[in-house]
Amino acid sequence: MQPMKSILFVCLGNICRSPMAEYIFKDLVTKAGLSDQFKIASAATSNEEHGNPVYPPAKRKLNEHGISCEGHAAHQITRAEYKHYDYIVAMEPRNLQRLRPIIGDDPDGKVSLLLDHTPATDIQHHNRGIADPWYTGDFDEAYEDILIGCKALLEEMKECL
C-alpha cells in the first residue's frame, strides 16, 4: 500500500474557503475510492474564528451538493503542522503572505495556491486566488472555483499514488 498523502487547506479564518476545500476534496476522494490514501484537513492563518463552525452560507452551499461539514472547528495553523502535511494549499496570495511568519520558509516546496494546480491552459482559473465569499457574498463562485481546483489537485495527486 502506498503511503498516505496529507493535505492542509488554508484561508484567513477557516470558516469559508478552506473548510469548503477540505470537505469538497474529501467528497471527491471518497467518490474515487481513495479515502484510505489521504489525510485531509483545513486551518486558518488567523485565530479570530478559533473554534467556530463552518460559516452558515458556506455550510448551506456544501449541503446543496450533498457534502456534510459537521464537526468542523476552525483553528490557526501552527509551525509544527508544516512538518505533518505533504501539501499546504492556500486559497489566495494573501494567505501565502500570512503563512510565512507562522510556518517560516518552505524548504520542501509544500505550499501552493489551490488554483495553481489547474492546467496552465485554463487561463480563467490558473494562477489566481479564490475570492473570499465572506466579503463578496458569492458562495456559488467560491464553490465552483474550489471544486475546479480540488479536481485538478486530485488528478495531479493520482499520478503520485
Image (cartoon, grey):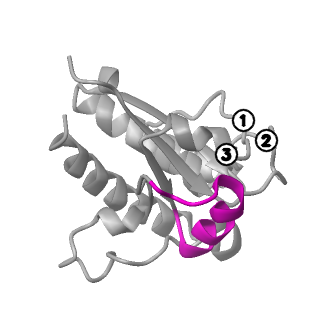
Q: Residue furthest front?
A: 107
In which quadrant of the rendered image does the N terminus lie? Answer: top left
Residue 12, x across and y down, in percent: 69, 61
Within 10 Å of disc 1 (Cα), the crowding (few <14, some 14-19, many 20+) is some
Within 10 Å of disc 2 (Cα), the crowding (few <14, some 14-19, many 20+) is some
Q: Quadrant of residue 80?
A: top right
Q: Nearer the viewer, residue 86 or 9?
A: 86
Q: CA distance from mark 3 to mark 2?
A: 21 Å
Q: Does label 2 or label 1 sit earlier along the sequence?
A: 2
Is 52 above or below relative to 3? below
Q: Which residue is mark 1?
A: 73
**Residue at left 35%, top 52%?**
150
Image marks 2 and 1: residues in contact by CB distance under 8 Å? yes
Q: Does label 1 or label 3 sit earlier along the sequence?
A: 1
Residue 13, x across and y down, in percent: 72, 55
In which quadrant of the rendered image does the C terminus lie? Answer: top left
Q: Which residue is mark 2?
A: 52
> Regarding mark 3 in the picture, which secondary structure is present there?
helix
- Asked if residue 105 is among those painted magenta in the image, a careful observer would answer yes
How many marks on residues? 3
**Residue at left 30%, top 52%?**
153
Q: Amino acid at mark 1?
A: Ala
Is 22 above or below relative to 149? above
Within 10 Å of disc 3 (Cα), the crowding (few <14, some 14-19, many 20+) is some
> Regarding mark 2 in the picture, which secondary structure is present there?
loop
Residue 60, x across and y down, in percent: 59, 47
Is 38 above or below relative to 59? above
Q: Does label 3 or label 2 sit earlier along the sequence?
A: 2
The residue range painted magenta reads: 91-107
Q: Amino acid at mark 3?
A: Arg
Q: Quadrant of residue 73?
A: top right
